[in-house]
Amino acid sequence: MTQKPLNFQSAREITNDWLNKFLQPQNDLTNRVIEAMRYSVIGTGKAFRPFLILTIGKMLNCPSDAIGQLAAAVEMIHTYSLIHDDLPAMDNDNMRRGKPSNHIQFDEATAILAGDALLTKGFEVLANMNVSSSQRCRLIGELAKAIGERGMIGGQMIDLIGEKKALSASEIQQMQTLKTGELIAYSCKAPCFLTSNCTPTKRIALTRFGLALGQMFQITDDLLDLYGNADLVGKTLGKDEKSHKSTFIARLGEKKARALLRDYTQTAQEATNVFDEKRKAVLNTIINYVVNREK
């Protein structure tokens, strides 16, 4: 597959090409779960994590097929988390990416299976990549850590606890690092495992960049929940306050939350300093998008 000029639209197109390849419809009774998987994972949304992988992978001159497959795998795993997050037992949200959530479009049991299947399919894709065994193991091991009990799932647990009691600022920071930051950081650093053009210093910088980006992404997400356009955001707004979620805005107030956003933005910008001016410009474009995003 050829690599197209990268922006959110082309990143989504590249990712969709690979997703369509990996999630072929079947002419048997398993097709219902495949249909549910495809419904949520293939679409027109921004695909932020695949965009990071493809953009940074291109910046580091990674093989285009490898980063395309990696992008598809991460989008599968991220989408599994969204399907489960929308379930009645979690956030109980009826809209996702501008259309009915998976459990509304299908049913709750099918949504659970679709999420489970996307999670496992993502790891299958990584296990079958045409790279060295050590590269595959690194990609799989680091991703499992990013989404496990000390990563995304742990962050979701803290988020649920935060609906029942007010979390401290440090607990909110931990929640956001685990729930959002770890997978975004993985998306920034994982291309390093596919090339010799990324020194340990640059990989550490990309990890730091991604963790700061994750905090920025979550704060802007919370601001969009208050002030965003529902048609652009693509999900139900105003739910954080109704669900008594613990956020920096709820804990510190909007003014201090915006100050934190500026602090994390500075951290992300500082992390780019190990790169040349051309690559710094690429990374700063990503920072500007997160700060100013409308969806």
Image: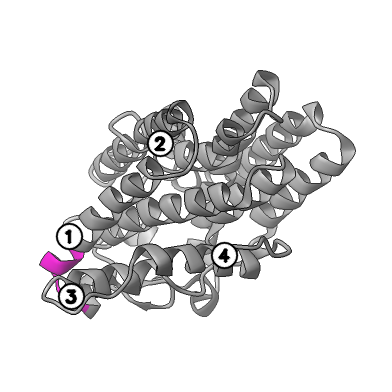
Residue depicted at 46% across the width and 35% down the height: 177
Q: Which of marks 3 and 4 is nearer the N terminus?
A: 4
Magenta residues (range): 106-111
Q: Where is residue 53 in the image (x, y as percent from the top left)?
A: 58, 48
Q: Distance between the residues labelled 3 and 4?
A: 25 Å
Q: Distance between the residues labelled 4 and 2?
A: 21 Å
Label 3 SS: helix
Marks 3 and 2 in Cβ contact (< 8 Å): no
Q: How far apart are marks 1 and 3 (CA)?
A: 13 Å
Categorize mark 3 by other alpha carbons within 10 Å: few (<14), some (14-19), many (20+).
some
Provide the residue designation for mark 4: 14
Q: In this view, does 282 lie above or below 175?
A: below
Residue depicted at 54% across the width and 75% down the height: 232
Residue depicted at 31% across the width and 56% down the height: 80
Q: Where is residue 162 in the image (x, y as percent from the top left)?
A: 30, 41
Q: Quadrant of residue 196?
A: top right
Provide the residue designation for mark 2: 143
Lateral position of residue 141 relative to residue 256, left or right:
left
Q: In the rendering, which numbered label is found on residue 32? A: 3
Residue kind at label 2, given as amino acid type: Leu
Q: Where is residue 23 in the image (x, y as percent from the top left)?
A: 33, 66
Q: Which of marks 3 and 2 is nearer the N terminus?
A: 3
Q: Which of marks 4 and 1 is nearer the N terminus?
A: 4
Provide the residue designation for mark 1: 112
Predominant secondary structure in magenta?
Answer: helix
Residue kind at label 3, given as amino acid type: Arg
